[in-house]
Image: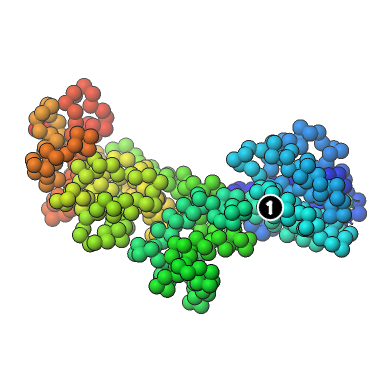
Amino acid sequence: MRKDVRILLVGEPKVGKTSLIMSLVSEEFPDEVPLRAEEITIPADVTPERVPTHIVDYSEAEQSEEQLYQEISKANVICIVYSVNNKKSIEKVTSHWIPLINDRTDKDSRVPLILVGNKSDLVEHSSMETILPIMNQYQDIETCVECSAKNLKNISELFYYAQKAVLHPTGPLYCPEEKELKPSCIKALTRIFKVSDLDNDGILNDNELNFFQRTCFNTPLAPQALEDVKNVVRRNMADGVKDNGLTLKGFLFLHTLFIQRGRHETTWTVLRRFGYDDDLELTQEYLFPLIKIPPDCTTELNHNAYLFLQSIFDKHDKDRDCALSPEELKDLFKVFPYMPWGPDVNNTVCTNEQGWITYQGYLSQWTLTTYLDVQRSLEYLGYLGYSIIYEHESQAAAITVTRNKRIDLQKKQTQRSVFRCNVLGAQGSGKSGFLQAFLGKNLQRQQRIREDHKSLYAINTTYVYGQEKYLLLHEVMPDFDFLSEADLACDCGVPGV
Ligand SMILES: Nc1nc2c(ncn2[C@@H]2O[C@H](COP(=O)(O)OP(=O)(O)OP(=O)(O)O)[C@@H](O)[C@H]2O)c(=O)[nH]1
């Protein structure tokens, strides 16, 4: 969410820019105004969207072109003011102001524009007939409003729309020409749907909808409201509601409707809650929360994280064979922007006879990633929506940072559950075979492993005094001169296999 909003008012001389600002601030029409109002800052607590808002005036008589360009580049939203009783000031909107602003702003990060027709007290008719075609022609125009600084009509609304255009912009979400959601918005909402579809049946049932509602808006929907939402979808499309739940199509339709009715903030609230920024990318804070790992400590998944991963496995193991077929695995990773596991994973963890990753193998791979590269693990948990489903502040709540290894050794006691063992030995001494045998793969199966699918790691569970622990074997290349710090940082070694 933005920290502040900067609104710039531009337009032809004498259309009433300064008067609009003064009317907003003093809540009365000023008889006399300066050429240009001083920049004002409205504190967060008196703005509708609770963000500090700066309002900046422009005066051709007082400012140079260079100063105007500077202000344009600093603005988050620009109000182009015209006077409804002055045709020339309306013409100038398209002949002068829009091209001037477009020339000075980056095509990919255009500022939203608002067309403001002032002095509505002076005319009987509306300027909308002239303005609507302009709105259809220029995508950057967020909205238009007619107002009067003189009788204070629509003044606070104007500044509210301006704030809203910055905080909840239409641009990234919706294409007004096509009257449909933009592809990146569909992608984000589809991920949100999949994360919220806890049983993975392609339908959000009442429980899932309520959970979603509570997560995003802090309140569940009343039963009648839930029915009303579904009825709106039913009335508009045939397959938006199925088995009394919302399908992806229905879910996307609802968001299209929110936007078309000017309730962008609803869709933005959902997107932000699920970690998206203004460009519909997952934020760095969401994917990579800060986590401190002191030296000699390792990282493991905690009990809650395993429960979560278990539920993710269950929801994708459709045939209940305790293994993920390639299709099931693909489906599991659909909420990721890329496929995180390559074919080497099948040779790093336990698989079934078909070579598919078993439940145990799946948890082992997560354990391995968390041990070797905790940032990656946090990122993956983020794609799966861990912190949202478990209502934690961040993905970091899934991680246990273990005690310093030296203290463990001193006390001869450890809480750790993952232990790393380096396997050393000359080329051809059978290290790979040793690793594969640890995964229960016999020589016949080992021979079928393609060279480029081989892994230098093998991880599996073992029992120590009745407790389940993970043992991670790492095959180290024979040239000892090149052993890295990480290669040496093991709990035990198996030399000369
Ligand atoms: N009737 C009417 N007059 C208005 C309204 N708003 C502004 N005016 C009058 O229009 C004239 C110009 O107003 P300004 O606020 O100075 O306009 P501006 O756009 O800031 O002008 P520049 O500083 O030249 O750019 C003044 O005489 C205002 O009193 C309005 O809503 N209705």
For label 1, being within 8 Å of ligand 1 is answered no
Q: How crowded is the residue under tag 1: few (<14 C-alpha within 10 Å), some, or many (20+)?
A: few
Counting from the top left corner in percent of width and height, residue 419 is at: 20, 43
Tell me which residue sits at (81%, 44%) in the image: 92
Counting from the top left corner in percent of width and height, residue 126 is at: 81, 60
As drawn, which residue projects farthest toward the bottom?
224
Q: Is residue 53 visible?
A: no
For this rendering, which residue is in front, 41 or 356? Answer: 356
In this view, 451 is above or below 439: above
Task: Look at the numbered disc 1 and give the secondary structure of its residue.
Answer: helix
Is 260 on the left-hand or right-hand side of 354?
right
Under mark 1, the amino acid is Asn
For this rendering, which residue is in front, 127 or 317? Answer: 127
State which quadrant residue 319 falls in. bottom left
For disc 1, the marked residue is 136
Counting from the top left corner in percent of width and height, residue 218 is at: 50, 65
Tell me which residue sits at (33%, 54%) in the image: 331
Is 115 on the left-hand or right-hand side of 412?
right
Tell me which residue sits at (62%, 53%) in the image: 177
Is 28 on the left-hand or right-hand side of 490?
right
